[in-house]
């Protein structure tokens, strides 16, 4: 079956095909199309025609909301099939994949519910003036989703883009495209007009680059690595396109001595090792107060060494493999860097010995102790099952360490003192701060980072506004000669 969706039809790509691999055992799940620049051009021009026609951009917001509600229902209807596909594609556990599908459905429902709630605003300028600010869709959107949460991250872009009245071309990662294909089928089933939703597959270096540089694209939204984000900014600059970037983080998780020890320990594992650490907001940089540091590190290493690795589809598996052999090799380079820098391997630091895991892309959960802020493993995003631990003595030192990063996506802190909790949260330069928790998000609240973690926000009201242009309409209700020029 052709796997590009352009102008309301499933079509074959002009490029070749590539294998999609199950990271648990390196088996081939399926093969999919690779688009090329001509496919991208067809998709973008289809999106432009659909936008300019007004079939979607001028549709009543309630009509757009109804379509998003239908997608929400279809996602829940197909939940088990989608979740199993996501596990095969990414290696994550089936439990997590099911949660992802629920979150994706909730994202579509949220933007359906707010699509018709923003009618702009009227300004009280004076008795003879009607002044109002209204919002319009940006236009044609190039949406590029990452490999770690392919369906979830795509939904954070697609749902608000549709709710705002835009048309789009979506590209998932070439390594994890399968659930995105399913989502586009559901959008088509829900009744999206031809050209409104378009899907292209293939590598970022060719397909993604063609999308971001295309002259008919008005907005580029990308989630991924910092280096790629820089290249996208440069490509978008030529056309002065609107851009939205989420570029990851090196996220601190602060444990004060007065915290609930067991709860903080449990969530430190979640923060660092959920989805094998392949999470933009992973709490991969643990800061522990001196009074409990040694006990905490010992307990963390003990718990991490007992995480059950395996097939994400198997009952009892707690964590799966890394996404690809190439990515595992990158993480292994950081393991060597950490050792060379003097970090102590409290647990892990290598591939597992279990013969059932040898074909897959596994690494043992790793705790690097005795770390300091000068180390690359502390400062750079590793994006794997690796957590570094630093010691601090005072609240001010903890805040200084947590903010000493080029990123600023998320952070957490653990304390039983309410005033300290709010005080520290206010001082942290991160887009999301969790207090006595880690990782939860809600579609009603904005998501995005400070510093080099990106530009713009996803989710929440701001997530919709990213896909809108504001227009001020000023009407003089009692026009008369201005008298400015006397001649």
Image: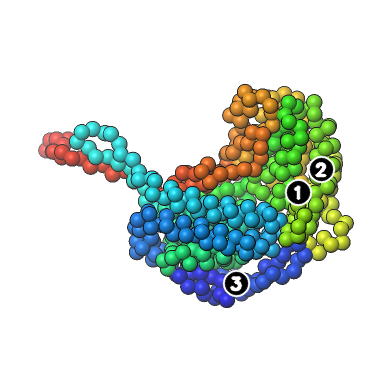
| CB contact under 8 Å: marks 3 and 1 | no
| Residue denoted by label 2 | 303
| CB contact under 8 Å: marks 2 and 3 | no
Q: Which mark is residue 166?
A: none
Q: Is residue 218 placed above or below 387 in the rendered structure?
A: below
Q: Is residue 115 left or right of residue 247?
A: left
Q: Position of residue 292 (x, y in %)?
A: 80, 29
User: Comparing marks 2 and 3, which lies closer to the viewer?
Assistant: 2
Q: Earlier in the sequence, mark 3 or mark 1?
A: 3
Foreground residue, 283 or 229?
283
User: Comparing marks 2 and 1, which lies closer to the viewer?
Assistant: 2
Instruction: Work out whether residue 343 can be spotted.
Output: no
Q: Quadrant of the N terminus?
A: bottom right
Q: Position of residue 207 (x, y in %)?
A: 56, 64
Q: Could you tell me which residue is drawn at 15 percent across and 40 percent down?
A: 479
| Residue denoted by label 1 | 385
Q: Quadrant of the C terminus?
A: top left
Q: Could you tell me which residue is drawn at 49 percent across and 49 percent down?
A: 110
Which residue is farthest front? 77
Q: Could you tell me which residue is drawn at 81 percent across and 64 percent down?
A: 359
Q: Is residue 372 placed above or below 418 in the rendered structure?
A: below
- Compute the Cα span from label 2 to label 1: 13 Å
Instruction: Work out whether residue 416 can be spotted.
Output: yes
Q: Residues within 10 Å of mark 2 (few under 14, many from 20)?
A: some
Q: Position of residue 432 (x, y in %)?
A: 59, 38
Q: Is residue 379 placed above or below 279 in the rendered structure?
A: above
Q: Position of residue 286 (x, y in %)?
A: 73, 37
| Residue denoted by label 3 | 33
Mark 3 lies on a secondary structure that is: strand
């Amino acid at each position: 079956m052709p796997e590009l969706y352009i102008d309301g039809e499933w079509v074959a790509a002009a490029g070749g095909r590539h294998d999609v691999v199950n990271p648990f055992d390196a088996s081939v799940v399926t093969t999919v199309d690779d688009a090329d620049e001509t496919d991208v051009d067809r998709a973008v021009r289809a999106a432009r025609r659909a936008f300019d026609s007004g079939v979607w951009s001028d549709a009543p917001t309630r009509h757009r909301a109804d379509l998003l509600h239908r997608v929400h229902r279809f996602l829940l209807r197909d939940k088990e099939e989608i979740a199993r596909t996501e596990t095969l594609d990414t290696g994550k556990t089936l439990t997590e994949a099911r949660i992802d599908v629920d979150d994706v459905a909730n994202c579509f429902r949220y933007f359906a519910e707010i699509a018709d709630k923003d009618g702009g605003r009227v300004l009280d300028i004076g008795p003879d003036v009607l002044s109002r600010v209204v919002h319009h869709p940006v236009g044609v959107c190039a949406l590029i989703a990452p490999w770690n949460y392919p369906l979830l991250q795509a939904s954070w872009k697609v749902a608000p883009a549709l709710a705002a009245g835009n048309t789009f071309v979506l590209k998932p990662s070439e390594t994890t495209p399968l659930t995105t294909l399913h989502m586009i089928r559901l959008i088509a089933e829900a009744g999206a007009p031809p050209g409104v939703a378009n899907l292209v597959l293939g590598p970022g270096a060719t397909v993604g680059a063609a999308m971001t540089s295309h002259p008919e694209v008005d907005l580029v939204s990308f989630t991924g690595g910092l280096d790629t984000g820089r290249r996208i900014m440069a490509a978008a600059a030529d056309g002065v396109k609107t851009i939205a970037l989420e570029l990851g983080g090196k996220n601190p998780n602060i444990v004060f001595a007065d915290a609930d020890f067991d709860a903080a320990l449990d969530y430190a594992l979640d923060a660092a090792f959920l989805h094998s650490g392949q999470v933009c907001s992973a709490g991969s940089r643990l800061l522990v107060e001196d009074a409990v540091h040694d006990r905490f590190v010992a307990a963390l290493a003990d718990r991490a060494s007992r995480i059950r690795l395996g097939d994400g589809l198997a009952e009892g598996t707690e964590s799966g493999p890394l996404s690809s052999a190439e990515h595992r090799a990158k993480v292994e380079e950081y393991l060597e860097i950490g050792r060379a820098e003097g970090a102590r391997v409290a647990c892990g630091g290598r591939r597992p010995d279990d013969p059932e895991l040898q074909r897959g892309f596994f690494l043992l959960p790793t705790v690097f102790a005795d770390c300091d802020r000068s180390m690359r493993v502390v400062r750079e995003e590793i994006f794997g099952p690796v957590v570094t631990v630093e010691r601090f003595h005072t609240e001010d030192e903890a805040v200084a360490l947590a903010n000493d990063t080029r990123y600023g996506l998320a952070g957490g802190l653990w304390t039983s003192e309410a005033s300290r909790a709010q005080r520290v949260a206010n001082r942290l330069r991160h887009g999301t701060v969790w207090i006595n928790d880690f990782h939860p998000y809600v579609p009603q609240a904005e998501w995005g980072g400070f510093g080099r973690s990106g530009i713009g926000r996803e989710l929440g009201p701001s997530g919709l506004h990213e896909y809108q242009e504001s227009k001020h309409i000023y009407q003089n209700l009692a026009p008369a000669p201005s008298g400015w020029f006397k001649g």
